[in-house]
Amino acid sequence: MTTQRTKLADARRTPRFAGLVTFGRYPRIEDVAPENRPIDWAIYGAPFDSGVTYRPGARFGPRAIREESQYLKPYHIEHDLMISEVLSLADAGDSAVHTYDAEANTATVAQFATDLPDPGTTKPFMLGGDHSNTLANMRAAYHRAGKPAGGLALLHFDSHVDTLDEFLGERYSHASPFIRAVEEGILDPKRMLSVGIKGPLNTRDDLAYARDHGVTIVTCEQWRREGYETIDRLRKAIGDAPTYLTFDIDCIDPVFAPGTGTPSVGGFTSYEALALLRHFASGPIGPPNLVGADVVEVLPDRDVAGNTALIAAHIVFEILCLDGLRKRC
């Protein structure tokens, strides 16, 4: 009999529309069997959106993503991977949040993720929430990974580079997580890859910090012209370095993912988004050495039929499968 690292409810006995709603129907972290500890990934929500610069509502994202994840199944056809056999996964609930103060919220969420059990083994996967929360989870991932010299590498999927110093006087908004991470020594900008950047900007200076500090930017249009050439080049440069992966749902075209606060047209299709992530499994040197991840900026009130939250749930699954493939190897 095959060993199950993640014990899932039998869908033939407990229908997917019944029971406690956790991500992917994974067990609550307190319910994980002793033989499946320490867990590989603790999935938690950060229901905070006071860092937004346009439409609020992403505070309801974690709940919506969990709800749509009930129909996720553990076998990945393309990878021939049964994720529940390879990884121990659990839902750690939601972090407390500091509703009216983005900087204080960053500290609160970072502390929650840092305090998850078994640092060095268990990796934090955050469901946003707006992109300001990423700084918190990156901070926790960096500490839990042993504070790697030079900081973390970053795989960043987004319509926006998110390296503004401040917006309307706020230095901890969803426009600024990565400039703050560089300042804290958490992130090495020369090993930061931003994929999917597109849309009109306020000025050309919006990209100045990223370009001046060596961030590799692959616009959506550039990816369609050249494919994976630049992506693969930086992936080789990153090598086996501890890496964080962040996925802002607004990099997907609003035709497919309308439920987001700062939509930008001309983005990836849902298929292209999945294909991009799968490429990191079969790319030049295999899956990255992930130490933390997140999916952010799902805004259920602007969603249609739950499509955006459903895509987000599948993105989470694809990212987890990258780590499952690495562990299987």
Image (cartoon, grey):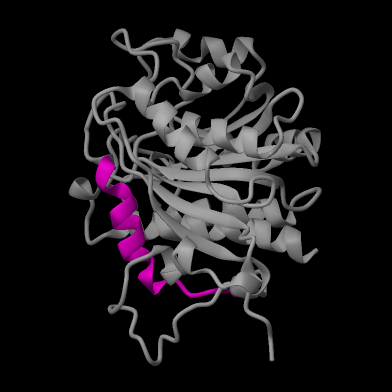
Residue 36, image quadrant: bottom right
- Tell me residue 308's x, y (percent): 33, 53
Q: Nearer the viewer, residue 216 or 313?
A: 313
Q: Nearer the viewer, residue 124 or 60?
A: 124
Whether residue 271 is visible? no
- Tell me residue 205's x, y (percent): 46, 8
**Magenta-highlighted stretch: main secondary structure?**
helix
- Tell me residue 62's x, y (percent): 34, 51
Residue 243, image quadrant: top right
Q: Is residue 66 magenta?
A: yes
The part of the chain drawn in magenta is 59-77
Q: Residue at x 32, y 36 (%)?
A: 97
- The tally of labels here is 0
Q: Quadrant of the C terminus?
A: bottom right
Q: Is residue 69 magenta?
A: yes
Where is 313 relative to 224, above or below? below
Q: Residue at x 64, y 39 (%)?
A: 144
- Left or right of residue 191: residue 171: left
